[in-house]
Amino acid sequence: MCMSCGCGANGVFVRGKRQSGKTGAPARFRPHAAGTPLKDNDATRIVRLEQDILAKNGAYAARNRELFSSNGILALNLVSSPGSGKTALLVRTLQALKNTRSLAVIEGDQQTDNDAERIRATGIEAIQINTGKGCHLDAEMVERALRQMRLPQNGILFIENVGNLVCPAAFDLGEAAKVAVLSATEGEDKPLKYPDMFRAARLLLLNKCDLLPYLVFDIALAESYARRVNPDIRIIRISATSGEGMGEWLAWLEAHQKESNRHAPA
Ligand SMILES: Nc1nc2c(ncn2[C@@H]2O[C@H](COP(=O)(O)OP(=O)(O)O)[C@@H](O)[C@H]2O)c(=O)[nH]1
Ligand SMILES: [Mg+2]
């Protein structure tokens, strides 16, 4: 079980074929004590715990959002599985914008400050959060990082979440939007397998498009799956390596930044 959000305990079913070839009845997974069934009280406690965690997170997220709003900051929460290219896309984005925009980055990983170092090499300030056993960033962690950094007034704050297509979907950090990144090497069906994440995202960056000629990856199918779980999602085909799609992504950023500035106090 995840040590920080309690995910993974409840509602898990294992389905498979028996050796006879018949499909077995779903078996409930009871990770806390093998052979001990979940009692109603246990289930109620888990739901309460989840509600408490999310309510506490929501209060911090509201404070972060207020801070972003009063400083005209567009805050974006980048979410994806590990290795889809979040940091590579950020590096390219920062290089394109750093001479004209106020920018900052918060990096989330379980261990190391490798990604913060990659960001700092562009000349942009980056704070690394290491979550240890945790599988996502929460709003309190972001608040602590914000206290240590110069705020990008009237600019853009990118928050690269821990690589994980599940838990970061549930945690509001105070961002204006979640931006999901899915790369062509991950398979088309990830939006169907992890719908919460693609439902929570306003924009989907379909990355590593430079590799399409070498992969079996039906990009139109991936897009249709994403739209099936989130009909409103905007999708941009992009490559951090070749630069394809960067213009469209930068235009999206500019439009959303104007929106944030409009809401900032004069
Ligand atoms: N071919 C190709 N490789 C990419 C692209 N974007 C990222 N990569 C590679 O994918 C790997 C993981 O990238 P990284 O930015 O660390 O992913 P993250 O874990 O989501 O931050 C690295 O080896 C990158 O060089 C891309 O658009 N095309
Ligand atoms: Mg990264």
Image: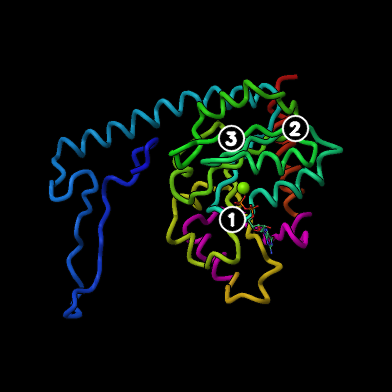
Residue 187 is left or right of residue 196, and the answer is right
In the rendered image, residue 221, in percent from the top left (x then y), is placed at 54, 70
Q: Amino acid at mark 2?
A: Gly
In the rendered image, residue 24, in percent from the top left (x then y), is placed at 18, 69
Q: Residue at x 76, y 42 (%)?
A: 254
Q: Residue at x 61, y 50 (%)?
A: 203
Identify the image quadrant of the N terminus: top left
Front residue (pair 104, 238): 104
The way the protein has been coloured in the rendering is rainbow
Residue 233 is left or right of residue 54, and the answer is right
Point out the tag, 3 or 1, that comes first from the N-terminus: 1
In the rendered image, residue 216, in percent from the top left (x then y), is placed at 58, 76
Point out the tag, 3 or 2, that comes first from the N-terminus: 2
Q: Mark 2: which secondary structure?
A: loop
Identify the image quadrant of the C terminus: top right
Disc 3 and disc 1: Cα gap in Å?
A: 22 Å
Report crowding for label 3: few under 14, some 14 to 19, many 20 or more residues within 10 A (C-alpha).
many
Task: Identify whether 37 is placed above or below 183.
Answer: above
Of all residues, the one furthest to the bottom in this rendering is 20
Disc 2 and disc 1: Cα gap in Å?
A: 27 Å
Location of mark 1 (residue): 83
Front residue (pair 61, 266): 61
Q: Amino acid at mark 1?
A: Gly
Location of mark 2 (residue): 155
Instruction: Name the mark nearer the viewer: 2 or 1.
Output: 1
The residue carrying mark 1 has its beta carbon less than 8 Å from ligand 1: yes
Q: Mark 1: which secondary structure?
A: loop
Mark 3 touches mark 1? (CB < 8 Å)? no
Report crowding for label 1: few under 14, some 14 to 19, many 20 or more residues within 10 A (C-alpha).
some
In the rendered structure, which segment of residues is drawn in magenta? 220-247
Location of mark 3 (residue): 175
- Assess whether residue 108 is covered by the magenta stretch: no
